Image: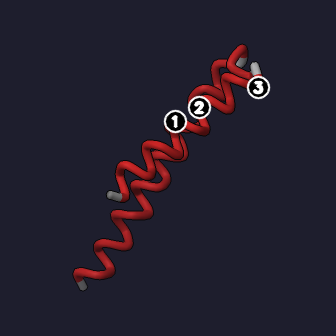
Amino acid sequence: MRKIVLFLVLAALTLAVYGLGISKNPIVTLIPFLVLGIYQSIEKRLERKKLQ
């Protein structure tokens, strides 16, 4: 369930970036992936804390 919500948020972010026309800058296109990576690392840390 969380994965689906996260995917929709990322899709919306990406569309917003393209819609604004900032996509001419290739670095901005990578931001959603950076956000996803950061989110996943935080989620893994939270899971480890729960297991302890």
Amino acid on which the number 1 mark rests in the picture: Ala
Eyeballing the image, is 42 above or below 3? below
Instruction: Assign the N terminus to one quadrant of the image.
Output: bottom left
**Hey, which quadrant is residue 46 in on the image?**
bottom left
**Hey, which quadrant is residue 27 in on the image?**
top right
Q: Which residue is identified by label 3?
A: 20
First in sequence: mark 3 vs mark 2: 2
**Hey, which quadrant is residue 19 in on the image?**
top right
Residue 18 rendering spot, x and y as whole percentages = 66, 23
Q: Residues within 10 Å of mark 2 (few under 14, many from 20)?
A: some
Amino acid on which the number 3 mark rests in the picture: Leu
Which element is circle 2 on? helix
Please give the name of the residue rendered at 57% of the width and 30% of the height, measured from the top-left corner. Answer: 30
Numbered badge on residue 11 = 1
Amino acid on which the number 2 mark rests in the picture: Thr
Residue 16 rendering spot, x and y as whole percentages = 67, 32
**Label 3 close to label 2 by CB (< 8 Å):** no
Which element is circle 3 on? helix
**Near-viewer residue (39 or 20):** 20
Please give the name of the residue rendered at 49% of the width and 52% of the height, measured from the top-left corner. Answer: 38
**What colour scheme was applied to this rendering of the protein?**
secondary structure
Is 18 left, or right, of 48 in this rendering? right
Please give the name of the residue rendered at 66% of the width and 28% of the height, measured from the top-left corner. Answer: 28
**Label 1 close to label 2 by CB (< 8 Å):** yes
Is 19 left, or right, of 1 in this rendering? right
Eyeballing the image, is 34 above or below 50? above
Q: Which residue is identified by label 2?
A: 14
Is 37 left, or right, of 2 in this rendering? right
